[in-house]
Image (tube, rainbow, N blue to C red):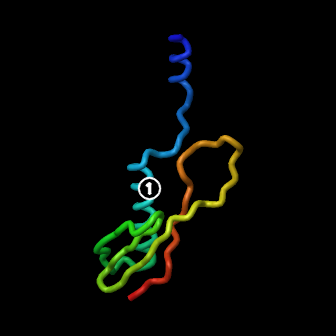
């Protein structure tokens, strides 16, 4: 029984990111897309999660909606790993 435990703990752990790390990855992607869209001269006042995989980025009187969409990548059956996604901006609303 102890040999099973030792073997189980020595295998590589491939799994989805814990929620706090997934959210951090999403926020980083949203911030990067918002900075590219708004330009470096506009200060981002707030980033708000408004729905599942939807963020509202506010800069002055402008709002940018950024959506998290799954990346279309093929994996072998049974593949486990962090969520692969892209941050896609909607048109800027000012």
Q: How many marks?
A: 1
Q: Residues within 10 Å of mark 1 (few under 14, many from 20)?
A: some
Q: Residue at x 51, y 17 (%)?
A: 5
Residue 46 horizontal/vertical position (percent) = 30, 71
Q: Residue furthest bottom?
A: 94
Q: Residue furthest front?
A: 51
Q: Residue at x 66, y 56 (%)?
A: 73
Rendered position, 54 above or below 9: below
Q: Residue at x 35, y 68 (%)?
A: 48
Residue 12 horizontal/vertical position (percent) = 55, 31
Q: Is residue 80 left or right of residue 30?
A: right
Residue 55 or residue 40, whichever sits in front: 55
Rendered position, 29 above or below 74: below
Q: Secondary structure at mark 1?
A: helix
Residue 22 or residue 35, whichever sits in front: 22
Find disc 1 in the rendering and name its residue.
Answer: 25
- The image quadrant where one finds the C terminus is bottom left
Q: Is residue 5 left or right of residue 79?
A: left
Rendered position, 76 above or below 37: above
Q: Quadrant of residue 44?
A: bottom left
Rendered position, 47 above or below 3: below
Residue 26 horizontal/vertical position (percent) = 44, 59
């Amino acid at each position: 029984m102890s040999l099973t435990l030792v073997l189980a703990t020595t295998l590589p752990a491939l799994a989805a990111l814990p929620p706090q790390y997934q959210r951090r990855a999403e926020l980083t992607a949203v911030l990067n897309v918002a900075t590219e869209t708004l330009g470096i001269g506009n200060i981002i006042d707030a980033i708000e999660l408004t729905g599942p995989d939807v963020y509202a980025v506010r800069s002055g009187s402008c709002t940018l909606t950024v959506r998290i969409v799954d990346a279309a990548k093929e994996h072998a059956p049974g593949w486990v790993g962090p969520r692969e996604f892209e941050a896609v901006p909607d048109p800027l609303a000012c």
